[in-house]
Amino acid sequence: MVSSKPDLTQLVAVALEEDLGEPGTDVTTRAVVDPNLIGEAIVIARKPGVLAGIRAAAKVFELVRPPCHYEALLADGSRVEPGDQVARVTGPLASILTAERTALNFLQRLSGIATITRGYADALAAYPSVTLLDTRKTTPGLRFLERAAVRAGGGHNHRDGLWDAILIKDNHVAAAGGVTEAITRARSARMPVEVEVDTLEQLREALAAGAEMVLLDNMSPELMRHAVETTAGRARLEASGGMTLEGAVAAAKAGVDRISVGALTHSAPALDLSLEVTKTWR
C-alpha cells in the first residue's frame, strides 16, 4: 500500500539535531554533569489526560549518544491522572538530560491530541453510529504521529493526504464551474467522491450527480437536520467546520454519519508531563 508516512528514526534524528545544533553538543550538560554517572528518571503526569507518543519518545532515547533505555509503564491510549508514572528511563545521566526536552516535546504534544480527542469521543459515545474524524490540519512533518495520537484518543483518521481520496472543496467547485461538473471530472480518478457543500441547493446537486459522500460545511444543526432528511440515505453525510464539543453533539443529534474536527490536531494543548531524575550511580 502506498503511504506518505515518513521514517520515525529520521524524524527524531532531525528533532535531536534541532536541539543540539551543528556541533551536536549539549554544552550545559557537558560542563556540569559527570559523564560517568548513570541515572534513572521517571516520566510523570502532572495533569489528567490520555497518553500518546510512546514510540517517538523511546526513539529519542535510543538515538541520543550514548543511548538510554526507555521502559514504557503505560500504553498509548491510557488515561492518566496527576502523579501517574508514564515511563522509566535508565542510562548515562548526561544522555537522559540531553534527550529530555525532545522526548517530552513529542509526548506532551501527542498526548494533548489524544486527550482532546478522548473528550470528543466521550461526548459522542451516546451516538455509536457517528464516526469522529481528524483532518489534514496537522503539524508539517508530524501528521503520521498526530494521526496515531487521534486513534489513541478514540478517534478515526480521514484521508492520509491529497493522494488517497477525493474531497472536492469549494475552491475546486469554483474552478470547475459548479458541483456537478466537479464531480463529473473527479470520476476520472476512479475513487469514491466526497464533495463539500454549504447549502441545501448544492446538496441536492451533489446527490443528483451521484456523490458517495457529502461534507456539510459550517451548517447550523437545523440545516443539518434538513440535509439528513433531504439525503434520505443516498449518501453519507459528514459535518465539519468549527466543531466545538457542543457543536459535534448537535451534529450527531442531527443524524450525520461522520464529524470531522480540525481542532483535534490544530488546537490541542500539550499535556503536562515532566521527567524527574530519581537516582544516580557510577
Image (cartoon, rainbow, N blue to C red):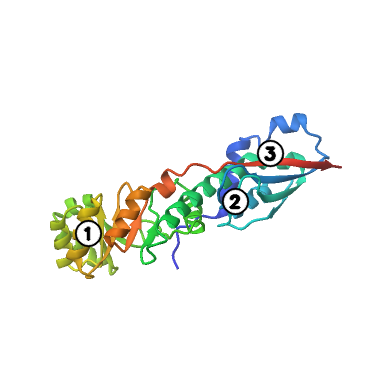
Count how many numbered circles sit on residues in the image.
Answer: 3
Q: Earlier in the sequence, mark 2 or mark 1?
A: 2
Quarter of the image where the C terminus is located: top right
**Which residue occupies the extreme front position in the image?**
126
Residue 204 position by quadrant: bottom left
Q: Which of marks 3 and 1 is nearer the N terminus?
A: 3
Residue at (15, 57) in percent of width and height: 200
Give coordinates of residue 15: x percent, y percent.
Answer: 57, 43
Gap in angstroms between the C-alphas marked 2 and 3: 25 Å
**Of discs 3 and 1, which sits in the foreground?**
1
Gap in angstroms between the C-alphas marked 3 and 1: 54 Å
Query: Which SS class for mark 1?
Result: helix
Give coordinates of residue 271: x percent, y percent.
Answer: 55, 44
- Residue nearest the viewer, comparing 235 with 244: 244
Which residue is disc 1 drawn over? Answer: 225
The three-letter code of the residue at mark 1 reads: Arg
Q: Is residue 16 visible?
A: no
Give coordinates of residue 41: x percent, y percent.
Answer: 73, 44
Left or right: where 278 falls relative to 136: right
Crowd class of label 3 (few under 14; some 14 to 19; many from 20; radius 10 Å): many
- Residue nearest the viewer, comparing 59 with 112: 112
Residue at (74, 45) in percent of width and height: 66
**Of discs 2 and 3, which sits in the foreground?**
2
> Which circle marks residue 80 in the picture?
2
Query: Which SS class for mark 3?
Result: helix
Q: Earlier in the sequence, mark 2 or mark 3?
A: 2
Marks 2 & 3, CB-CB < 8 Å contact: no
Marks 3 & 1, CB-CB < 8 Å contact: no
Residue 206 position by quadrant: bottom left
Give coordinates of residue 97: x percent, y percent.
Answer: 70, 38
> Which circle marks residue 98 in the picture?
3
Quarter of the image where the N terminus is located: bottom left
